[in-house]
Amino acid sequence: GSDGHILVNSVEGSGTQFYIYLPRVDGRVGAAADAPDDSAGMQRGNETILVVEDDAHVRKFVEAGLTSLGYRVLTASGGAGGLDMCRNEPGEIDVILSDVIMPEISGPKFMASAVKLRPDAVPIYMSAYTRDEVLRFRRPGEIGIPLISKPFTLEALSAMIRERLDDR
């Protein structure tokens, strides 16, 4: 990656702060075109990933990152929009990446319906909650759905996605 990182500080009722740390680059703008691809070490792919996340900042970070690695990314800001995508998207959906705690439809409720509509898709949860906290929200039988904890790096996310896709 770029050797940068993002820290997230979220306080219920007060909002969320993102701290983005990027290394300083010396040189002229545009020189990067001649440089080797920074994401070369990351797990790339060309599959389609549906990202369901109510936080716009997280959704845009994930969409931009996965797009930069070659994936086709569909996004929805909640479970209802995610299910519309599952019903109406004419192409394949290879991965369904969903937040766990969302307003209106919870991640587990959304995921239960989504995997019925797209049985070949790989389900993955993302959450700022710990694994133990997330277990309380899960429905019986979904213990096998992996969870990536926020904040996460694009490198960690791409590695998890690739591993799950390659295991299909």
Image (cartoon, grey):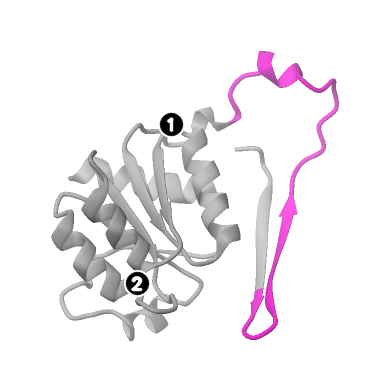
Residue 28 sits above or below residue 57 on the image:
above
Taking the view exactly as shown, the residue that stands out farthest to the top is 34
**Where in the figure is residue 21, as x and y percent of width and height?**
74, 51
Residue, x 46% and y 62% (percent of image)? 77
- Res 147 visible: no
Please report the residue visible at 68 percent of the width from the left and 46 percent of the height from the top: 4
Camera-side residue of 22 and 94: 94
Q: Give the residues drawn in magenta, as a range.
A: 10-38
- Residue 147 lies, in percent from the top left, at 37, 65
- Residue 22: which numbered mark, if any? none
Q: Is residue 101 visible?
A: yes
User: Which circle's residue, 1 or 2, is located before the other in the chain?
Assistant: 1
**The residue under label 2 is which amino acid type?**
Gly
Looking at the image, residue 94 sits to the left or right of residue 13; the answer is: left
Helix, strand or loop for disc 2: helix
- Which quadrant would the C terminus be assigned to in this image? top left
Quadrant (top left, top right, bottom left, bottom right) of the N terminus: top right
Which corner quadrant of the image does residue 51 belong to? bottom left
Question: Label 1 neighbourhood size at 10 Å, few (<14), some (14-19), many (20+)?
Answer: some
Magenta includes 27? yes
**Residue 115 to residue 72: above or below:** below
Residue positioned 65% across, 86% down in the render: 13
55 falls in the magenta region: no
Which residue is under mark 1?
Answer: 70
Residue at image position (26%, 45%) is 89
**Along the horizontal axis of the image, is 161 left or right of 139?**
right
Tell me the crowding category of disc 2: few under 14, some 14 to 19, or many 20 or more residues within 10 angstroms, Cα based.
many
Q: Secondary structure at mark 1?
A: loop
Residue occupied by mark 2: 107
The amino acid type found where label 1 is placed reads Gly
Q: Does 121 sit above or below residue 124?
A: above
